[in-house]
Image (cartoon, coloured by chain):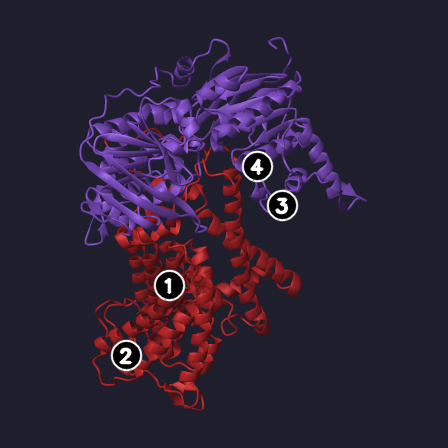
């Protein structure tokens, strides 16, 4: 494959935004039939680069060559014409329309010039679907299929439009491990058929699992392009971050003290009033990290919301530091000693339009010195927030910057700073590293261990087995709203993986 | 102005300026202004307005064949804003010398048409500022208060009731009591919508529209023949408010809609609005709920409580507007006033054009007030523009401004949506 001709070449691509060079003379080469991973931290310029290829941005300098000829791509439709297809992180599908309708959208087969030929659409979609073994029902509605299947629809859409270069922007961010494996299989089929794939990610294990070659970007510059053979996670992490990164968290054995979080027979319903948590009991003690592992959608979200007072529980009790907080409002939970890093920092963890000072004061804006007699003291908030931003190494903004202007990792640092700073007895960290790059993950992990060692009870909820295994002192496996297994930190990924499928009900702890 | 810099970081990917210097960094006023301007905060409303006037001028040209420039000159003269450039109309006196001690110019001359027109503009500005704030405050909490009109009527009726009864009171308490009653009435009416939103989730738009109709007919009943507030069956009018309840008119003549001290109430309301939103914990909660109710709730803020409070406070502003009109120049209210008035609906346009900021609302209230008086049949020079068409011209330009404001929000939202499509920026959940 090394001598396969390049289908796409970028030479000296430079893209400047006011105050920042997003791409600085980036060179990139995609060969026919390869999966080429584009690796880099958040903000390294990966997205900018592929957006240039897809015609969403214009490069300030440099040239794009397709099949050896310089081309100018000034719009996504120009990119599609040249055989470039892109699958965005957020799917652009219409939920109430069928798979086939979505795929042929804007390229509908017509009969007699004006009538849409849905029969033909179905047929063509099935053809493509069969050819690549996608296993997808063309007549299903988008809203009824899983996220993994929706992603396949996006890929099919690109193929239907004649793409032979496929760009996938962090495709696994929304997938379960099994769905990710299925996706990789599909990608392998595609490249065997002669397609070429650009795969954007910041997850090192995925790169090693699927890429033929890897290009690392750091701060807008190409660091290197290397073949997968011989690459290691440590080496890639160093290239991405520019320094040594500890992938395993270093920690002492836990020294658990008194129980700070006690959950008994908790039952919680989801939005549709269906049972999501079905009778769960566990305890978290001071100085230990208890992780809840499980596949997404098994009741973890509802459990965390109930523990934080954001969702009413149907039965059971929750005690924080000896106080029964069952059924009380979120503020009472916070005041009793709860810190909560929510799983969705954009929807819940931050008010994006607020500045960082205001965001850091989200729980304590009513307390002196942030305010007195109902009057805010923005200067005192800013002074206090400045200290926190320094302590938690939040980069890219001041106390006056809006939260929306930060990168994901720095946004998460703001959330962590706010939750930890209140000196909570119990800290719930729900998917605290989702969407973060290695540098920020390292920071969050170290901080969680540090907080554990300071005597907090930490409940970690994570979909990443690796994270669970490296942080947790005890592991509870969640399946369909129940705890189906309890492990200590010496558990193997295989044991956990089997338990996560609910395959061993005999170990049920609840 | 922190609420105004709706910054759209053009760099993407969160590559904002580097980490704050140890000495502490606060953006200067100029920097903030530049930022605000860059994102179209000041420029877009201005462009919107100019564009509306330009298109309005084209329509004038095409439909009537009149020269748009001379038409606009006539409108400008009609607003009375030419008073400021009219030599000879500034009969400025020494303050503290005559009986209107604290106002430094002649307050009794009706010789100047410009002064007379300007007085009308300022009286209208007062009302529009307050009805604009009634919409803007609710907006900041994420609520759309269409009920300004009903709340305004409630305030008018309450102030006319208190102002015309309790005859013989001292002036100061009587005025305060009348105003207080009006604000309370507005707040109660709006509070119903807030309460229903907070408790059962009834949409505030639907509820406030229904409340508008309730006030429409309640007013008709109260003022109609045999109604409790009716004092003049022939005109279906209330009694006149007592002298002791009237607001002091400091420029012009009370019986010719001179400028009353309600103008200062409106300016004070703008300051209060800005302070409450930006400098109080209440305002913090309102803004948090308006921007992101999920995050607010997670932060420990009661979303329901803020929905109720924001609506009630919006109602305070609208009720105050009603009191200002009754106590300032109308002095009574008729059933046809209740049923014919649309002044508070214009508050929606004022808030939209003013981007829900204090300064913006004040300026756009002035603009709409000037537009209303400048194109009124009474003020528009009949030699330049047929008086029969004047009202149409008002509606035309108003409509264009609102249309372009809407379009400008549309442009911004398209711009934002486009940015959202650019991946890697937000890590949001997939469409499910």
Tell me the quarter of the image containing the C terminus of chain A.
Answer: top left
Query: Residues under labels 1 and 2: Cα distance?
Result: 31 Å
Query: Residues under labels 4 and 3: Cα distance?
Result: 12 Å
Vertically, is B70 above or below A508?
A: below
What secondary structure is found at the residue carrying circle 2? helix
Query: Residues under labels 2 and 3: Cα distance?
Result: 64 Å
Q: Residue furthest front?
A: A506
Using the image, name the chain to which the residue with label 3 belongs.
A
Mark in front: 2 vs 3: 3
Can residue A435 be seen?
no
Using the image, name the chain to which the residue with label 1 belongs.
B
User: Horizontal placement of B231 versus A117: left or right?
Assistant: left
Mark in front: 4 vs 1: 4
Can residue A200 be seen?
yes
Using the image, name the chain to which the residue with label 4 belongs.
A
Q: On the image, numbered disc 1 is attached to which residue?
A: B194
Q: On the image, numbered disc 4 is attached to which residue?
A: A150
- N-terminal-most mark, 1 or 2: 1
Check the rendered structure and report the hue given to chain B. Answer: red
Q: On the image, numbered disc 2 is attached to which residue?
A: B245
Q: Residues within 10 Å of mark 2 (few under 14, many from 20)?
A: many
Check the rendered structure and report the hue given to chain A. Answer: purple
Q: Residues within 10 Å of mark 4 (few under 14, many from 20)?
A: many
Q: On the image, numbered disc 3 is attached to which residue?
A: A97
What secondary structure is found at the residue carrying circle 3? loop
- Give B63 or A131, whichever is nearer the viewer: A131
What secondary structure is found at the residue carrying circle 4? helix
Tell me the quarter of the image containing the N terminus of chain A.
Answer: top right
């Amino acid at each position: 494959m090394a001598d396969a001709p390049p289908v796409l070449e970028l030479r000296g691509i430079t893209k400047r935004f006011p105050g920042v060079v997003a791409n600085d003379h980036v060179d990139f080469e995609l060969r026919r039939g390869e999966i080429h991973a584009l690796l880099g931290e958040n903000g390294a310029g990966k997205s900018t680069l592929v957006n240039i290829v897809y015609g969403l941005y214009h490069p300030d300098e440099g040239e794009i060559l397709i099949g050896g000829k310089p081309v100018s791509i000034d719009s996504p439709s120009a990119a599609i014409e040249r055989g470039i297809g892109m699958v965005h992180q957020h799917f652009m599908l219409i939920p109430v329309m069928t798979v086939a309708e979505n795929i042929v959208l804007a390229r509908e087969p017509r009969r007699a010039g004006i009538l849409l030929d849905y029969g033909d659409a179905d047929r063509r979609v099935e053809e493509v679907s069969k050819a690549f073994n996608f296993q997808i029902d063309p007549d299903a509605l988008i809203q009824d299929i899983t996220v993994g299947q929706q992603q396949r629809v996006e890929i099919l859409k690109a193929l239907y439009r004649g793409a032979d270069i496929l760009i996938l922007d962090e495709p696994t961010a929304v997938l379960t491990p099994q769905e990710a494996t299925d996706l990789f299989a599909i990608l392998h089929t595609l490249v065997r058929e002669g397609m070429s794939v650009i795969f954007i990610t910041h997850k090192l294990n995925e790169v090693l699992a699927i890429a033929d070659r890897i290009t690392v970007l750091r701060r807008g510059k190409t660091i290197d392009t290397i073949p997968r053979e011989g690459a290691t996670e440590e080496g890639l992490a160093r290239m991405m971050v520019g320094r040594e990164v500890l992938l395993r968290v270093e920690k002492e054995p836990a020294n658990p003290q008194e129980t700070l979080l006690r959950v008994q027979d908790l039952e919680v319903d989801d939005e549709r009033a269906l049972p999501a948590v079905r009778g769960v009991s566990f305890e978290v003690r001071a100085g230990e990290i208890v992780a809840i592992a499980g596949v997404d959608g098994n009741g973890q979200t509802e459990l965390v919301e109930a523990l934080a007072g954001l969702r009413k529980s149907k039965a059971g009790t929750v005690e924080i530091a000896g106080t029964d907080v069952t059924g009380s409002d979120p503020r009472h939970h916070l005041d009793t000693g709860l810190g909560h890093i929510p799983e969705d920092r954009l929807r819940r963890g931050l008010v994006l339009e607020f500045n960082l000072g205001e965001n850091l004061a989200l729980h304590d804006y009513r307390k002196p010195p942030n305010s007195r007699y109902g009057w805010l003291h923005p200067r005192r908030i800013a002074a206090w927030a400045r200290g926190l931003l320094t302590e938690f190494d939040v980069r890219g903004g001041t106390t006056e910057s809006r939260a929306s202007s930060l990168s994901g990792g720095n946004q998460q640092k703001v959330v962590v700073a706010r939750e930890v700073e209140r000196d909570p007895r119990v800290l719930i960290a729900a998917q605290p590293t989702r969407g973060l790059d290695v540098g920020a993950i390292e920071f969050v992990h170290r901080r969680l261990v540090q907080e554990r060692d300071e005597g907090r009870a930490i409940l970690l909820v994570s979909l990443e087995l690796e994270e669970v295994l490296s942080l947790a002192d005890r592991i509870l496996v969640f399946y369909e709203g129940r705890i189906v297994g309890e492990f200590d930190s010496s558990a193997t990924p295989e044991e956990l993986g089997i338990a996560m499928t609910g395959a061993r009900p005999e170990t049920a702890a609840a | 102005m922190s609420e105004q810099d709706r910054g759209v970081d053009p760099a993407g990917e969160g590559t904002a300026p580097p980490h704050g210097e140890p000495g502490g960094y606060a953006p200067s006023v100029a920097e903030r202004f530049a930022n605000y301007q860059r994102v179209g905060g000041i420029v877009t409303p201005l462009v919107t307005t100019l564009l509306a006037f330009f298109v309005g001028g084209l329509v004038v040209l095409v439909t009537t064949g009149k020269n748009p420039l001379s038409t606009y000159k006539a409108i400008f003269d009609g607003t009375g804003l030419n008073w400021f450039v009219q030599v000879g109309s500034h009969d400025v006196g020494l303050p503290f010398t005559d009986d209107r001690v604290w106002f430094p110019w002649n307050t009794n001359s009706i010789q100047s048409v410009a002064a007379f027109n300007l007085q009308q503009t300022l009286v209208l500005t007062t009302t529009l500022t307050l009805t604009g704030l009634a919409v803007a405050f609710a907006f900041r909490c994420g609520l759309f208060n269409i009920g300004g009109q009903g709340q305004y009527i409630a305030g008018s009726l309450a102030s006319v009731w208190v102002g015309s009864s309790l005859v013989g009171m001292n002036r100061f308490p009587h005025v305060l009591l009348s105003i207080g009653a009006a604000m309370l009435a507005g707040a109660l009416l709006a509070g119903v919508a807030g309460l229903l939103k907070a408790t059962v989730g009834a949409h505030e738009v639907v509820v406030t529209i229904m409340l508008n109709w309730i006030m429409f007919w309640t007013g008709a009943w109260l003022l109609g023949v045999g109604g409790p507030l009716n004092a003049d069956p022939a005109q279906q009018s209330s009694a006149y408010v007592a002298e002791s309840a009237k607001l002091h008119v400091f420029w012009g003549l009370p019986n010719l809609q001179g400028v009353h001290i309600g103008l200062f109430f409106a300016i004070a309301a703008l300051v209060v609005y800005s302070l409450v939103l930006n400098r109080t914990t209440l305002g913090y909660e309102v803004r948090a709920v308006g921007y992101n109710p999920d995050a607010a709730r997670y932060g420990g803020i009661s979303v329901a409580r803020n929905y109720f409070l924001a609506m009630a406070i919006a109602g305070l502003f609208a009720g105050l507007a009603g009191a200002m009109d009754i106590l300032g120049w109308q002095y009574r209210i008729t059933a046809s006033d209740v049923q014919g008035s649309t002044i508070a609906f214009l508050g929606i346009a004022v808030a939209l054009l003013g981007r829900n900021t204090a300064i913006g609302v004040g300026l756009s209230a002035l603009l709409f007030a000037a537009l209303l008086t400048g194109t009124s049949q009474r003020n528009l020079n009949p030699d330049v523009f047929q008086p029969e068409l004047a009202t149409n011209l008002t509606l035309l330009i108003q409509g264009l401004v609102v249309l372009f404001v809407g379009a400008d929000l549309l442009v911004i939202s398209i711009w934002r949506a486009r940015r959202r499509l650019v991946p890697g920026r937000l890590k949001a959940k997939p469409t499910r």
